[in-house]
Amino acid sequence: MQLMRSVALAIASLAFAGPSYAQDEPKEGDPPFARVADDEETIYAVQRKAFSVEDKLELTPFVAATFADRFVQSFAIAGSLGYHLRETFAVEVFGSYMFPTESGLTREILDRGMLLPETAKLTQLLWAAGAGVKFSPLYGKVQVMGAVLGNLAFYVGAGFAIGESRVRCTSGQRLDPAKFGDRVCPMQPSVDEEAYEPATLRPLGAISGGVRFDLSEWLAIEFEVKDYIYVARVFRPEVDAPTQRYTDAVRNDLFAQLGVGILMGP
């Protein structure tokens, strides 16, 4: 039995013995390109990207406008400063300064004395600033007749922010006692201007999605849709009654933003 075991081991050693090659030494039948080390072997969706954004800072000024609110319209100047940790992932700080007004529909309702929507739906966002992340799940390269025009990247983002909002009120009307004590709505500045409650600081959520087209190593064009989400609660006392009444609404301030990205770094 011991003899048979020794013979089997000897046959096995001969079967597995053979010429050895150095790791980097080419063998017959190998492809013409050198093998990439195991820790670097990755399959990319797009080979030979025109420009790289990894490890770069990106400063992007925007012009923006709301497009989905029936009662409030707003224009804004905005901006973001992001750092691309990888080709597909970035962190950023962002901000917007808004110029809100009542929409044509709201003014028509007021002029005709029609029933207004819940007052909380008329809340106007004045500014917002926050921080978040961006992820680019889809990206590609634009090439025409062999000439590379640039990279195209679709991204989504999410973050948290703070902002300040205001809401119209009637001159002399009592304001929310929990926030303003015994204060009342200020007098109307003029016949053509509305009176507003004092601005209120509030937390916001921010989600976004967009596309970035890299024209060169340092210049890009971006189109983005950004949604500032917050809960508005507005106090309105019942007319000729001591009853306190609140109206609530989840506000989505959707902005379409167009900007120019300036990339800085290696």
Image (tube, grey):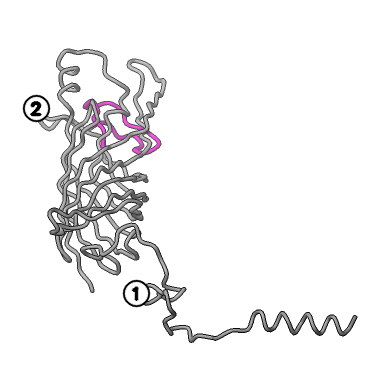
The quadrant holding residue 250 is top left
Residue 176 position, x and y percent, is: 36, 32
Depth order, front residue of 246/81:
81
Depth order, front residue of 180/68:
68
Q: Are marks 2 and 1 in contact (CB under 8 Å)?
A: no
- Residue highlighted by disc 1: 33
Answer with left or right where residue 76 lies relative to residue 7.
left
Quarter holding the C terminus is bottom left
Is 211 drawn above or below residue 175 in the view shown? below
At mark 2, the secondary structure is loop
Q: Is residue 85 magenta?
A: no
User: Which residue type does callout 2 highlight?
Assistant: Asp
The quadrant holding residue 33 is bottom left
**Crowd around label 1: few <14 · some 14–19 · many ≥20 (10 Å):** few
| Magenta residue span | 166-185
- Residue highlighted by disc 2: 192
